[in-house]
Image (tube, helix red, strand yellow):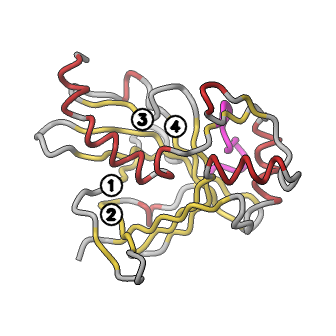
Amino acid sequence: MGGATHKKLFPVLIGLCLFLAGCDEVYSLFTLYDDESVMSNDALLGRWQQIEKDAQGNEKVDTCCWVFAKDEKDKHKYLLTIPDDNPGEAMVSVVHLAKLGDAWFVDVESPSEDELKTNRVPFPFLNVHLIGRIWIEMDSVRMEFIDKEEFKKAEVSGHVRLTYVNPNDDIVLTGTTEQLQAFAREHAEDKQVFSTEFILRRPR
């Protein structure tokens, strides 16, 4: 794809960055899910809008939308598409759900070349994963992702222990899938780890 397309889709990238932890997300080199933990929940399918709250707690509905669709070849894979204002342009991510104990998690990763179409931009751009907690209901979805600055504080205090590298001041977890799952189970209800909350609702 040419530079012009990337420039057109830049506002969409910013929107997804704001959706996924304000561009301060923590990445992982390995998946959180494996063959035993990967699950599907088709209540996720369809169109959603992000709900934001101001300092007074008043809700504001984002005009943009996130559309989850089922992959035709893999029942456990979802494609997340965020349309741009320009017809035919969109950003696409691959989403997997994992169940560890009683808790559900989400793993967002880059799509393959085959999953991209003209005028689509992969997110994340690198072959990495974003992991978080997820709660799915019929008309609402709540997600909690790992915030970079909060992770640093928790790591320095010894509250969390997971190997990572710090390129360009980013946090990239290097733990294996097994280690990530142990970490996720331990901190599933830990607001200091999964500290950035986002809420989606069905359009009304």
Give the residue at mark 1: 66
- Residue at the spot x=54%, y=56% of the render? 40
Q: Give the residue number, with chain letter if any, for mark 3.
A: 123
Name the residue type under label 2.
Answer: Trp
Question: Which numbered disc, 4 or 2, marks the residue that appears first in the sequence?
Answer: 2
Foreground disc of the pair 3, 4: 3
Q: Which residue is mark 2?
A: 48
Label 4 near label 3: C-beta < 8 Å? no
Label whose residue precedes the other's in the sequence (2 or 3): 2
Label 3 element class: loop
What range is drawn magenta here? 28-38
**What is the distance, in whole Å, between disc 1 and disc 4 at their CAs?**
15 Å
Q: CA distance from mark 3 to mark 1?
A: 13 Å
Distance from Cα at disc 4 to Cα at disc 2: 19 Å
Q: Amino acid at mark 1?
A: Trp
Residue appearing at x 56%, y 45% in the figure: 25
Q: Which mark is residue 109?
A: 4
Q: Is residue 29 left or right of residue 108?
A: right
3 or 4: tag closer to the N-terminus: 4
- Tell me how far mark 1 sits from mark 2, CA to CA: 5 Å
Q: Is residue 67 left or right of residue 182?
A: left
Q: What whole-number distance in Å separates the C-alpha atoms at marks 2 and 3?
A: 18 Å
Kindly indicate whether the residue at mark 2 contacts the one at mark 1 (C-beta within 8 angstroms).
yes
Quadrant in which the C terminus is drawn: bottom left
192 lies left or right of 16: right
Give residue 170's quadrant in the image.
top right
Report if the CB atoms under discs 1 and 4 are less than 8 Å apart.
no
Residue placed farthest to the left in the image?
87
Name the N-terminal-most of marks 1 and 2.
2
